[in-house]
């Protein structure tokens, strides 16, 4: 069965710290890996990584896909309190449009 | 505003009752997905519709059903509600998974 595992489950840091969130996956017919940020309610899309696009960056956030290790990391540099959220990793289940989500990493950034 | 509209935002109902959650997808998106998010389970896929047809089914209980109408809005019907059905229910829409989903803001269902 396709599976996504994220670590750590929760993380508490101080403003200005750099954090690395991990995601490992097991899926047949890998196509892409997606990162979402969930604050109060709806998850919002951050990045999509594919075999042809293994590294993405947006401001202080960046993500890398390691196809050999079946994993991805999400880096946030110079964290701010507004980065506090649950970060979700997901992969499409092989051959379908269903996304399989990890349980998320809850990041808390203290001032 | 993500463009995906879910109503109602909150719903409190008693055990044994039936409720209907509604979702309007983003303009141009033909696929609608329903997910359940509870504290211990994370986001769990329930069902997907594409242009009015059921395309994929997840771990959706028999007490739950859904449909997508010709105008592409979708409804999720939950019946014989139990305390354990209390959760956030999200609708998402997409052109195709390759581009990811856009989520609505969810309906928080509380069964008392």
Image (spheres, rainbow, N blue to C red):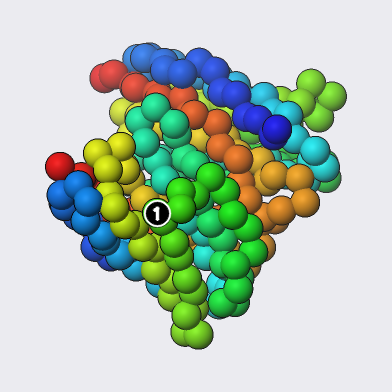
Q: Position of residue B26 (x, y in %)?
A: 47, 71
Q: Is residue B89 left or right of residue A37?
A: left
For mark 1, name the chain.
B
Residue at figure coordinates x 61%, y 46% from the top left: A99
| Residue A82: quadrant of the picture | top left
Residues B59 and A87: in front is B59
Hey, which residue is sitting farthest bottom in the picture? B70
Q: Give the quadrant of the C terminus of chain A.
A: top left
Q: Is residue B5 visible?
A: no
Residues B56 and A96: in front is B56
Q: Position of residue B106 (x, y in %)?
A: 34, 54
Q: Secondary structure at mark 1?
A: loop
Q: Position of residue B61 (x, y in %)?
A: 46, 48
Q: Give the quadrant of the N terminus of chain A.
A: top right
Q: Is residue B80 left or right of residue B103?
A: left
Q: Position of residue A96 (x, y in %)?
A: 71, 53
Q: Is residue B98 visible?
A: yes
Q: Is residue A16 left or right of residue A33?
A: left
Which residue bears the numbered disc 1? B63
Residue at figure coordinates x 56%, y 23% from the top left: A6
**B83 up-or-down from B4: above or below:** above
Residue at figure coordinates x 34%, y 22% from the top left: A108
Within 10 angstroms of label 1, few (less than 14), some, or many (20 or more) residues?
Answer: few
| Residue A33: quadrant of the picture | top right
Residue at figure coordinates x 46%, y 18% from the top left: A9
**A8 up-or-down from A94: above or below:** above
Q: How many marks?
A: 1
Q: Is residue B2 left or right of residue B46?
A: left
């Amino acid at each position: 069965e396709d599976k996504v595992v994220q670590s750590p489950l929760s993380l508490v840091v101080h403003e200005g710290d750099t954090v690395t969130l991990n995601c490992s996956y097991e899926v047949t017919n890998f196509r892409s890996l997606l990162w979402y940020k969930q604050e109060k309610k709806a998850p919002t899309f951050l990045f999509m990584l594919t075999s042809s696009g293994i590294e993405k960056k947006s401001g202080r956030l960046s993500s890398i896909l390691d196809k050999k290790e079946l994993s991805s990391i999400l880096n946030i540099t110079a964290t701010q309190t507004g980065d506090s959220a649950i970060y979700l990793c997901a992969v499409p289940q092989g051959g379908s449009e269903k996304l399989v989500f990890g349980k998320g990493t809850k990041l808390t950034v203290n001032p | 505003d993500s463009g995906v509209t879910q109503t109602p935002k909150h719903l409190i109902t008693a055990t044994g009752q039936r409720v209907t959650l509604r979702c309007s997808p983003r303009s141009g998106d033909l696929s609608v997905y329903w997910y359940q998010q509870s504290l211990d389970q994370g986001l769990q896929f329930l069902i997907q519709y594409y242009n009015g047809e059921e395309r994929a089914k997840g771990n959706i209980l028999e007490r739950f059903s859904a449909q997508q109408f010709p105008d592409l809005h979708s409804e999720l019907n939950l019946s014989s509600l139990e305390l354990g059905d209390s959760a956030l229910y999200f609708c998402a829409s997409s052109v195709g998974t390759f581009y990811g989903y856009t989520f609505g803001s969810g309906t928080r269902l509380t069964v008392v």
